[in-house]
Image (cartoon, coloured by chain):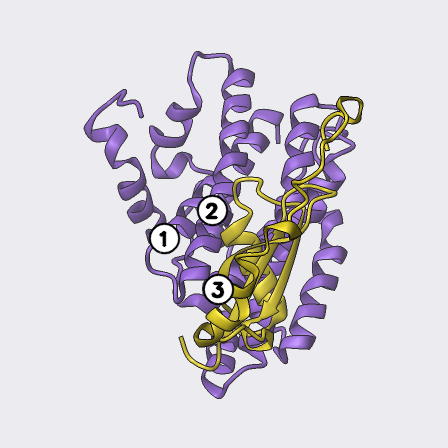
Chain colours: A yellow, B purple
Amino acid sequence: MSEATPLWEVFIRPRNGLAHKHVGSLHAADEVLAMHAARDVYTRRGEGTSIWVVPSAAITASDPERAAENFDPAGDKIYRHPTFYDIPDDVGHM
Amino acid sequence: MPLLDEVLALADDHLILGHRISEWCGHAPMLEEDLALPNMGLDLIGTARTLYSYAAEIEGKGRTEDDLAFLRVEREYRNLLLVERPNGDFAQTMLRQLYFAAFMEPFWRAALQSSDRVIAGVAGKAAKEMAYHVRHAGEWVIRLGDGTQTSAARMQAAVQELHRFTGELFDGAGPEGILPDRAAIRPEWDRVIAMVFAAALLQVPGVPFPQTGGRQGLHGECLGHLLAEMQYLQRAYPGAEW
């Protein structure tokens, strides 16, 4: 599409209490039509109770070329995962 | 009109407009609208199905919803002339949708009070669907009317073409307490259309020759072509099932 219908990212909250989750993108002329399009494209099968649309241009994304320096250092620090504790049975499901 | 005729007329309005909208499937100007339009068409056809089933029940002659939808001839259809009008361009399609939905939304809201269980049930679902159709079609009418020179000219041309068919929306009344008085919907319809037109910079035209006749079965040539396509399968393979 052209600049007349820029790209929007769509986030849907499936149920109350859950977070909005990215479901895809679409083209629309403005935020009102983007909201309509999101409703028609992404909630036809009862997927959601709330919609966010965000101009794709408003999103700052991490640079894939910096993926190594961003994410690799976390790879060998297993002590950051809370897996070294014994959870008492009485606590049940956490 | 008796309840059967009123229910059938309402069902015909919804089926014919639903079919018209379905003609856009695969042809809409953008992918997003290619999903939005069939969504709206399916809303209308869903309402039509319930109404045809109810009409068949009232009639009590063993006909089914499919018999009523697919096996009547042109003159037996009681739909408004407005809903059978060809899709034209996107401006015409959106304007036709706005004209129809801006009437049906308050109509169904009033019908929520119906003493008839089926009518009140249909109204509960349809009022919400029509509210969305008004919003969606209204936003497009505003954007095209107050858009580029070309889109504004096309939108005003759509108004010139279709406005003469709108008077028929307000003709007739069903059995009191069961279906709303159609004339009483006029002020709300006028209000919504005036609001959208003001934002869209469109003029409400004078209508020297209002077009009516759909409720008497007097249709335009375009309905025959629509039925030929819509009824083809049931005519060619009688009793065919999905």
At x 45%, y 72%, the residue is A64
Label pair 2/3, CB-CB below 8 angstroms: no
**Residue holding disc 1:** B25
Label 3 crowd bin: few (<14), some (14–19), many (20+), radius 10 Å = many
Q: Are marks 2 and 1 on the same chain?
A: yes
Distance, label 1 to label 3, CA atoms, is: 18 Å
Q: Are marks 2 and 3 on the same chain?
A: no
Amino acid type at mark 3: Leu
Distance, label 2 to label 3, CA atoms, is: 21 Å
Residue B103 at least partly seen: no
Sequence order check, earlier mark of 2 and 1: 1
Q: Could you tell me which chain the residue with mark 3 belongs to? A: A
Residue B54 location, x and y as percent? Answer: 55, 22
At x 33%, y 28%, the residue is B71
Residue B107 at least partly seen: yes
**Residue holding disc 2:** B41
Which quadrant is the C terminus of chain B positioned in? top left
Label pair 2/1, CB-CB below 8 angstroms: yes
Distance, label 2 to label 1, CA atoms, is: 9 Å
Residue A4 location, x and y as percent? Answer: 48, 80
Q: Nearer the viewer, residue A27 or B205?
A: A27
Q: Is residue B82 left or right of residue A52?
A: left
Q: Could you tell me which chain the residue with mark 1 belongs to? A: B
Residue B6 location, x and y as percent? Answer: 59, 32
Total of numbered circles in the picture?
3
Amino acid type at mark 2: Gly
**Residue holding disc 3:** A26
Which quadrant is the N terminus of chain B positioned in? top right
Q: Quadrant of residue B196?
A: bottom right
At x 29%, y 35%, the residue is B231
